[in-house]
Image (cartoon, rainbow, N blue to C red):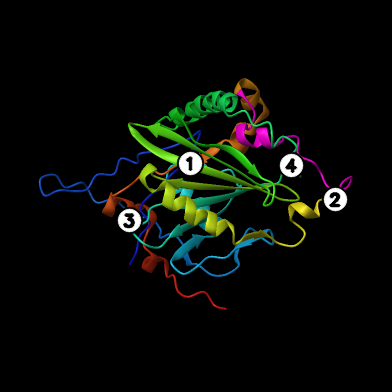
Amino acid sequence: MHTIRGAAVLVGTILLSLGFALASPAAVEPAQPEPQALPWKLGTPAAPIGSDLAEIDLAEGLIYLDQAGTRQFLELTQNPTSGTEMAVVAPASDEQQWFMVFEWNEIGYVKDDEKDDLDAAAMLVSIREATAAGNEERTKRGWPTMEIVGWQQEPHYDTASNHLTWAIVGASEGHQTINRMTKLLGRKGVMTVTLVAAPEEIATASAQADGLLGGYRFRPGNTYAEFLPGKDSVAELGLKGLILGGAGAALIKSGLLGKFWKVIVAGVVGLGAGISRLLGRKKDAGVGPTPT
């Protein structure tokens, strides 16, 4: 059956090499214990994201993890969890190695009045500062550090969909990957969707992700348009804050680093048996057709 090969979600930004090596006749590695198979489910219309929060239409050929499975996925890929993680969506095919992680932050209604004032150059400076702070935590855990290469897509806001999107190229241990972030504004907070892909796959993966997000929707009562002025809470951050999460020392002191600055990263490509052990196989997870 198919496996999911690319993956790893990091604090800071971009790419983690998990260091798996394929065994050869000359040097056979000691057998590694098999992790518990991840509970992948086949794609289905109106697949839930969170409890009564949102849903997404997933076509045939896609699989996903619920909240518990997503946390397991992050732990297996050596990435800390924060409790905001809701779902992972990925292709079932070995030929595609991108994946998407959904995270929910109930911070209140985010005003979009900064949509025409997104200074990409200044933001990149702050993102690098935040990444340096995130690297301190990675170093404590014995994980590779990250560095920011630059924008792959500068921030832009779509007023029709209330989606804020950008993409960053990052590197770790000589490898590059791209994180394409989309913030979906809702009545009570923000759903962050991070597309993780290798540079050579980002164009195709981005097109597929955009199609998927066209089938995403907040459930009634949670949409951006249902905000009630004077009744619903308003977030302290605007669109700029969603991109930066804060800046420098202020970011760390406020605690927003852990809340907002977790970018997702692809790191393991073409490692066959190693990544199969890490992520598990669909057949092992007992995935079958979803009842209707």
As helix, strand or loop, the secondary structure at mark 4 comes to loop
- Using the image as rendered, state which of residue 246 and residue 135 is in the foreground: 246
Expressed as whole percent of the image width and height from the top left, the position of residue 249 reads 62, 21
Q: Residues within 10 Å of mark 3 (few under 14, many from 20)?
A: some
Residue at the spot of label 3: 276
Give the Cα distance between marks 4 and 3.
Answer: 40 Å
- Of mark 3 and mark 2, the one earlier in the sequence is 2
Which residue is drawn at the image coordinates 47% and 28% (left, top)? 135
Expressed as whole percent of the image width and height from the top left, the position of residue 287 reads 44, 70
- Asked if labels 3 and 4 touch by Cβ distance under 8 angstroms, the answer is no
| Vertical order, 36 against 13 (above or below) | below
Q: Residues within 10 Å of mark 2 (few under 14, many from 20)?
A: few
Give the Cα distance between marks 4 and 1.
Answer: 22 Å
- Of mark 1 and mark 2, the one earlier in the sequence is 1
| Vertical order, 250 against 110 (above or below) | above
- Of mark 1 and mark 3, the one earlier in the sequence is 1
Amino acid on which disc 3 is placed: Ser
Q: Hey, which residue is sitting farthest bottom in the picture?
A: 292
Residue at the spot of label 2: 228
- Of mark 4 and mark 3, the one earlier in the sequence is 4
Q: Nearer the viewer, mark 4 or mark 3?
A: 4
- Region in magenta: 228-247
Expressed as whole percent of the image width and height from the top left, the position of residue 111 reads 76, 40
Image disc number at residue 110: 4
Q: Nearer the viewer, mark 1 or mark 3?
A: 1
Which residue is drawn at the image coordinates 75% and 37% (left, top)? 113
As helix, strand or loop, the secondary structure at mark 3 comes to helix
As helix, strand or loop, the secondary structure at mark 1 comes to strand
Which residue is drawn at the image coordinates 48% and 50% (left, top)? 206
Residue 220 lies left or right of residue 133; in this view the side is right
Residue at the spot of label 1: 179
Which of the image's four quarters has the C terminus?
bottom right
